[in-house]
Image: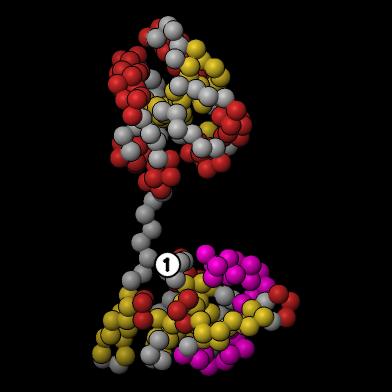
Amino acid sequence: MKAVIIEDEAVAAQRLERLLLEIAPDTEVLATLGSVKTAAQWLRTHPADLIFLDIQLSDGLSFSIFESVPVSTPVILTTAYDQYAIKAFELNSIAYLLKPIRRSALEEALNKYQSLRTAFAIDFNALQEAMQPRQHYRERFLIQVGEVFRKVETTEVAYFFSAHKSTFLRTQAGKTYDLDLSLDRLEPNLDPTRFFRINRKYIVSMRAIDQMIAWSRSRVKLKLSPPPDEEQDTIVSIDRAGDFKAWMDH
């Protein structure tokens, strides 16, 4: 068996290699790699039967290795990470070793590898997605108009805007309501696939954009539906124009 150890702690890597050779003397450790960069470079040109992978390396999460390098090699995680990471790992049926590594745990992981290797396939995109905290975006707003409360779904919103030191939302039906929070506080709570902050005054829904016009200095002017009070305010700012075009073209 040819193995590679991706681990940035020298003592941990040496201990793992020693235990590995004790349990499986025919193992050849091809390399010990300590960073995302060196591991990605090595894996591009070197095959291996098994990868021992630490989650946290000196230059970032090790899962980023597989963003640029397609790897189908079975992986055993070696980690001191928290239970959330372990749970994400378990959902993808990958063996893991919790540091400090115990001989019995390593032996069990190798036995599992031997029994599964003919059918072993890793979906690293699913694993990386599972590692990310789930973001919950606003689904509705409770609006008070006088003594009456009204529920406004975010799917009804055409855009949010600031005016006269206040924040408002305008629905696709043309209704305008006052909001008790700033655009800066509101922005992180909106689904970025549906809403975009075009400038300091407006966050727009993609559905509200009727027309886009090339403007000076590589900017874009938007015609929204329903129309805003001041159309001059719906010009995408210079620093956001590139991201806006990418958002529209996604």
111 left or right of 200 in image:
left
Which residue of the protein is positioned furthest toward the right in this rendering? 217
Identify the residue at horizontal 29%, vertical 21% (top origin). 115
On the question of residue 185 being in view, the answer is: no
Q: Give the residues drawn in magenta, as a range.
A: 226-250
The quarter of the picture where the N terminus appears is top left
Work out whether residue 128 or residue 250 is closer to the camera in this orientation and state it: 250
148 left or right of 133 in image:
left
183 left or right of 104 in image:
right
Query: Residue 87: where, in percent of width, then height?
Result: 31, 39
Magenta segment includes 127: no
Query: Residue 99: where, in percent of width, then height?
Result: 39, 24
User: Circle 1 is placed at which residue position?
Assistant: 191
Identify the residue at horizontal 31%, vertical 86% (top origin). 144
Work out whether residue 168 or residue 204 is closer to the camera in this orientation and state it: 204
Identify the residue at horizontal 55%, vertical 67% (top origin). 249
Tally of marks: 1
Work out whether residue 1 or residue 29 is closer to the camera in this orientation and state it: 1
Which residue of the protein is positioned furthest toward the front in this rendering? 118
For badge 1, the amino acid type reads Asp
**96 is higher (above) or lower (below) than 85:** above
Identify the residue at horizontal 56%, vertical 29% (top origin). 43
Work out whether residue 14 or residue 45 is closer to the camera in this orientation and state it: 45
Quarter of image, res 151: bottom left
On the question of residue 180 being in view, the answer is: yes
Quarter of image, res 243: bottom right
**245 is higher (above) or lower (below) than 233:** above
